[in-house]
Amino acid sequence: MSNLDRQAALTVCGGRGFVVAEPVRELLSPRRVQLGESTEVRRLLPNLGRRMVGAWAFVDHYGPDDIADEPGMQVPPHPHMGLQTVSWLHEGEVLHRDSTGSLQAIRPRELGLMTSGRAISHSEESPRPHARFLHGAQLWVALPDTHRHVEPHFQHHAELPRVTAPGLTATVILGTLDGVTSPGTTYTPLVGADLALAAGAETNLPLDPDFEYAVLAMSGEAHVDGVPVLPGSMLYLGCGRTELPLRALSDAGLMLLGGEPFEEELVMWWNFVGRTDEEIRQAREDWMTGSRFGEVKGYDGDRLDAPEVPATQLKARGRVR
């Protein structure tokens, strides 16, 4: 999914200097952003004061939206570099096309994982006809320097492994949780899991104390380590935890995101993750001149133009503003 903000701001993130090395409870409020013709998203990362959670560098939550009489998600072809995109649905369907030739319908609790590597372009759209409701999350994972120039590729996994406990089903989207590992390719130690809690459930989820974590609330009413977390908000949890107390007041859906604190400092602008001002400006020029990022075939419409890069030099700094 693209960052469609026409006033795209520079994001500086990464580096271990600002990692909270102990358990915390930091509730993050979203920023509302219009995406395409009829989809409004709640942006949780990057957030004022909190830029990354492990290698997770971008989190949008959208829906549930009634799109019965709307076009739904319509994101024209746009470029990416230096990251992976994770498409995750609770309701609806999204059709993915990219410049490697991939064409894939992504349905609820199926993993759509696109590794941009050195350069890729893609589009996302609600099919015609489509389901009435659309509800999901779009996330980016920053690639480390050793792998950020890999060849672009796309993976789709309709079946994913699960961890279960009384009142809890955890689908492992990426990485490893409680000894269970997703088939999705990762390049840094991290975890992403979809947590389905039954009303009245109380359980403790095992965690890695070397990871930092956050929980995104998708639906329902739940308490995370005693903190009420409403849908569309995110609770940052810091490091040093061996388990996470969860309690559901109703049927609830959460996403657990975590990973080793990302060592490298990044420059993230529009849909590009790089390391220097020069890289970002060259990527924009390559997209606008039609080189490097390939072509998305079959999308009915024009591709996106990139916004103007700020006149000031883009610099990589730390994890928080």
Image (cartoon, helix red, strand yellow):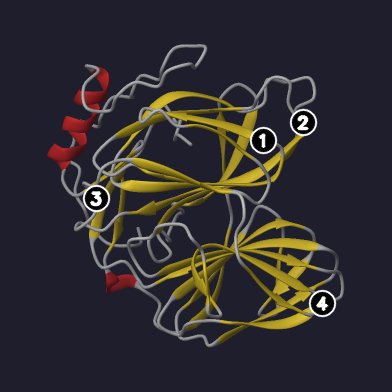
What residue lies at 23% left-to-right and 41% top-to-bottom? 118
What residue lies at 46% left-to-right and 54% top-to-bottom? 47
Q: CA distance from mark 4 to mark 1?
A: 29 Å
Residue kind at label 3, given as amino acid type: Arg
What residue lies at 22% left-to-right and 32% top-to-bottom? 283
Mark closer to the chain start, 2 or 1: 1
In the rendered structure, are the residues bearing label 4 and label 1 in contact, judged by CB atoms less than 8 Å apart? Answer: no
What residue lies at 39% left-to-right and 48% top-to-bottom? 84
Mark closer to the chain start, 3 or 2: 2
**Which mark is drawn over residue 93?**
1
Foreground residue among 234 and 123: 123
Along the horizontal axis of the image, is 2 left or right of 161? left
Q: Secondary structure at mark 2?
A: loop
**Which mark is drawn over residue 131?**
2
Q: Which residue is mark 4?
A: 201
Mark closer to the chain start, 4 or 2: 2
Residue kind at label 2, given as amino acid type: Ala
Residue 235, x across and y down, in percent: 58, 67
Above or below, comparing residue 61 to residue 207 in the picture: above
Residue 164, x across and y down, in percent: 71, 75
Q: CA distance from mark 2 to mark 1?
A: 7 Å
Foreground residue among 310 and 253: 253
Q: Nearer the viewer, mark 3 or mark 4?
A: 3
Q: Which residue is mark 3?
A: 148
Quarter-of-image position of residue 167:
bottom right
Residue 58, x across and y down, in percent: 45, 50
Mark closer to the chain start, 4 or 1: 1
For label 1, count other residues whose C-alpha is less than 10 Å away and answer few (under 14), some (14-19) or many (20+).
many
Along the horizontal axis of the image, is 17 left or right of 99? left
Residue kind at label 1, given as amino acid type: Glu
Q: Secondary structure at mark 4?
A: loop
Q: Nearer the viewer, mark 4 or mark 2?
A: 2
